Image (cartoon, coloured by chain):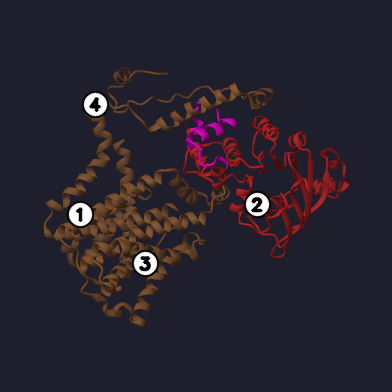
Amino acid sequence: MDSAALLKIAGVYKNFGGVQAVNDLSFELAKGELLGLIGPNGSGKTTAVNLITGFVRPSQGKILYRGRDITGWAPYKIVRLGIARTFQMVKPFYQLPAYKNMIIPLYSPRVKQLAGGKYGDRDAVALDLLEEVGFERDALVAYKSASVLPQGYLKRLELAKAIALQPDLIILDELFSGLSLAEVAGIVPIIEKLRLEGKTIIMIEHRLKELFRIADRVVVLNYGEKIAEGRAQEVMQSETVKKAYLGSEV
Amino acid sequence: MRVSLEERCACRRSRFFCGEVKKPRIPKERPSNEVLQKRSAPSAVNNMAKRKERIDRGIKARSADIFALSCWREMLYLAAPRVIPVVGFLILPLILGLYWQKVLLSVAVFALLAISWDILAQTGMVSLGQALFFGMGAYAAGAIDHYWGWPPLAAVPAATLMGGLICTVLLVPVLRLRGIYFSMVTLIIPLMLVRIVEATRIFGGTEGLSGITPLPSKWIELYLIMGALMAALFGFRRILASDYGLVLKGICDNDRSVINAGINIYWFKAQALFISSCIGAFSGAFMTHVYMFVGMPVFALDYSILPIAAAVVGGPGTLAGATLGAFILVPLSEILRGAGGLRIVFYGLFLVVFIVAVPEGIFHYVQRKYH
């Protein structure tokens, strides 16, 4: 599996002062796989994502992408390699209309490079991508300012901004949190479509039911340590995982 | 839906705009999973249809601000906000007396500094030291004239680039700072430079460099600065409205999100800084040739604070607001000279009244009322 691994995390540690946020984390990710990263609150999931995307530098350990050591790289350089992410707390450009939000990722050097300098009209591509994530065609919603959009659309916008970068690896940080069941049901097909296109995906989730339906494999974190890894149903049978999720009194 | 121009205008004769009004439509249901899978299957026909859709939507996006013009009133409505200032800038030097012509020079210089501040502010860098840009340009022009003896029309552009470059290099190390921390550094550097000039006695020390060659004539002076103001105002407004400008605004709005798009924000910030400092350096270099002198006062706090006041009173974020603010505040300060010792009190009162009455800025208010 070593040579086929798209992403390899090897013995990564991260401490913020006295807090050990990530403790000896190692896992691999094959191309085209959908990995779920789960764990109770504060277990270091988002820190793990920040480590992969370069927003946080690991104290120790290595992160390899396509066999290349990307440990400690600047985040914008990592994005250019083809790793895109969404944020748990959505980060749209509130001053701009939704479709203008898409212009900034479309202005990315990665997009220019992939398109060979012939990308055409960014507004048109932006509207096209927004339609793919469920901004209804011809409805006014894509033209509305991001500051007035409801949470469901902001999450979709966040996803669209990641897709716009044409990444090979997409990391979705709690994409489903704060969404209704109907909204989640609307987003799941988009993720499945991304998989059909051959994208590799890491999903951090608390909505386990929805995640388990689509994930190939799950990694469970607790207090920054990996406590289990494997197929979703098997992992949830593990005593350690039950304990971590439900507490020791059960 | 294609409707002829006449039909459109006939039905909305009372309105100035003849654009198509977008109607909210009932959103379509999300296609099922199978449909999505089918869609993603590669087929030439599907691709062609998709491409056509893309082109159609591109036209829709681009034509959002395009309106059919059918009568002179509509044309005037759209052209007036651009034509009136341009005509004003060109005619003002001709109709004003000698004293007010000098005031006009000062207005234009402060307008340029306010534009320079506004560009930085839109990129998320609130500067309290426009005097740094102004002073650096002024000293560069003075040094070029004094030591190398270049003619003013060559010295001004050279000093603009030189001043811009030096300021950018000075501030690049602090680009990572945000908010008040960046502001503090920009405030301190010009104050520091004054002391350096004083202590080391470089460039004439406390006496400065005098006897700088003036510009060839009064009219060249006036039209050079007016031309520069128009170029900066309309040119940079256009740049900030482009996709490049969106990236700059994005950095102000949410810099992590811009990084997450694979964009090196420090490179973009440095570019904005260079543009802004070049504008400031130009006004400094210009004033050196007008006063025929350059000395420590070019780093004075006036050049830092007044541009901010102008941008805030006029309305930040548009460049036009900054210009309008300078056109109000500088002449106001001249008119109040009659008040003697109480001048600064009245000036301060006016500032407070403007800010309390129109907190969004005069330009935004006028723009809203106009439309």
- Chain B tint in image: brown
Q: Are marks 4 and 1 on the same chain?
A: yes
Q: Residues within 10 Å of mark 4 (few under 14, many from 20)?
A: few
- SS for dot 4: loop
Q: Position of residue B246 (x, y in %)?
A: 45, 45
Q: Which residue is identified by label 1? A: B223
**Which region is colored magenta?**
A114-142
- SS for dot 3: helix
Q: Residues within 10 Å of mark 1 (few under 14, many from 20)?
A: some
- Asked whether A74 falls inside the magenta stretch, the response is no
| Parent chain of label 3 | B
Q: Amino acid at mark 4?
A: Cys
Residue visible at 32% across and 28% down in the picture: B17
| Parent chain of label 2 | A
Q: Which residue is identified by label 2? A: A53
Q: Nearest the camera: B236 or A218?
A: B236
Q: Position of residue B130 (x, y in %)?
A: 36, 63
Inter-mark Cα distance, 4 to 3: 49 Å
- SS for dot 2: helix
Q: Which residue is identified by label 4? A: B71
Inter-mark Cα distance, 4 to 1: 33 Å
Query: Which badge, 4 or 1, comes first in the chain's sequence?
Result: 4
Q: Amino acid at mark 2?
A: Thr
Q: Which residue is identified by label 3? A: B132
Chain painted red: A
Viewer can see residue B327? yes
Q: Quick one: quadrant of the N terminus of chain B?
A: top left
Q: Position of residue A14 (x, y in %)?
A: 72, 60
Q: Are marks 2 and 1 on the same chain?
A: no
With B229 as the anchor, is B178 left or right in this view?
right
